[in-house]
Image: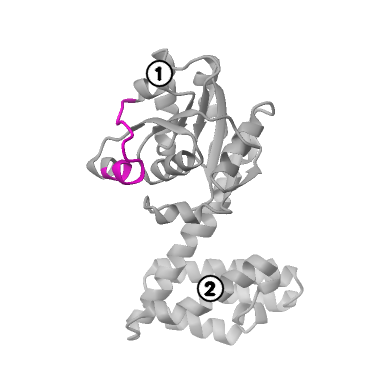
Amino acid sequence: MDAPRLGIGIISAGKVGTVLGAALSASGHRITGIHAVSEASRDRADALLPGVELLDPAEILRRSELVLFAVPDDVLGELVAGLAAGGHFSVGQLVAHTAGRFGTSILQPAMDAGAFGLAIHPAMTFTGMSMDLQRLTDCVFAVTADEAILPVAQALVVEMRGEPVVIAEQDRVSYHAALAHAANHLNTITAQSADILRRIGVEEPSNTLRALMYASLDNALRSGAGALTGPVARGDRGTVTAHLQALADDPAETNNSYRSLSRATALRAADRGLISQSTLEELLRVLE
């Protein structure tokens, strides 16, 4: 699955673009240039891609066989369309992006100019520092491309030491929603739980939560819904009622999260036969 050595340009020097650029450089590709606007992005480019020229997008396109767009989702379409209108894409050029929610259709203006579109999204959060390079090992990348060009996208991921997983164009938004639901909402409920512990005087909530959450996440990833545990999964209505009373003076967002996630857990527990239908109905009444 080795791809030919390419001249690769990076637009832009955000946390994702610089790290992936460094990974591609380490695999033997030549980085032709990187676009960086802010001082932070210039510093990041200098740290991870030393010696690589800072160029504007049009010049990067002119110099590169493959251009990697690592810009915010809401910017990508307009930027690609503008560069296509300016005649900056070349026939046969590879154009990739790292936006999770989009497949290759967002690159249609470039493809209309004769370029080949690739969507390559790493399922990982980035710091924009060198430590991210190690974390790319075995990281799953969602890849979407036309069947003829798909092996190139897969090879590029393998060269970055990642694992390519093919996601159909029509499934990209669902894929991205799943990742956001898991990663972003985990952060939210962790913060809410830490707030409750601080309220009752626990000075280092992370020490209390760490082992429990690590074990819970590992069990969930290994066993799925089979790892359900806790008062809701046991049908312990009294404990759930006590929880709600204890949380009554906490912010509404915390109370609402507890109720919503408890309802979802109760439905899953009932579906797996862990609690009876009557217990489910009692829990849902308590959680209204």
Q: How was this image coloured?
A: one colour
Closest to the camera, between mark 1 and mark 2, is: 1
Q: Is residue 200 above or below residue 227?
A: below
Q: Is residue 178 above or below residue 277?
A: above
What amino acid is found at the position of numbered circle 2 in the picture? Tyr
Q: Is residue 220 left or right of residue 271?
A: left
Q: Where residue 146 appears, x then y in whole percent?
A: 65, 28
User: Residue lying farthest right?
Assistant: 273
Q: Is residue 66 left or right of residue 2?
A: left
Residue hosting label 1: 62
- Stretch in magenta: 43-56
Q: Secondary structure at mark 2?
A: helix
Along the viewing direction, whichever of 279 and 89 lies nearer the viewer:
89
CA gap between label 1 and label 2 equals 47 Å
Residue hosting label 2: 214
Along the viewing direction, whichever of 169 and 119 lies nearer the viewer:
119
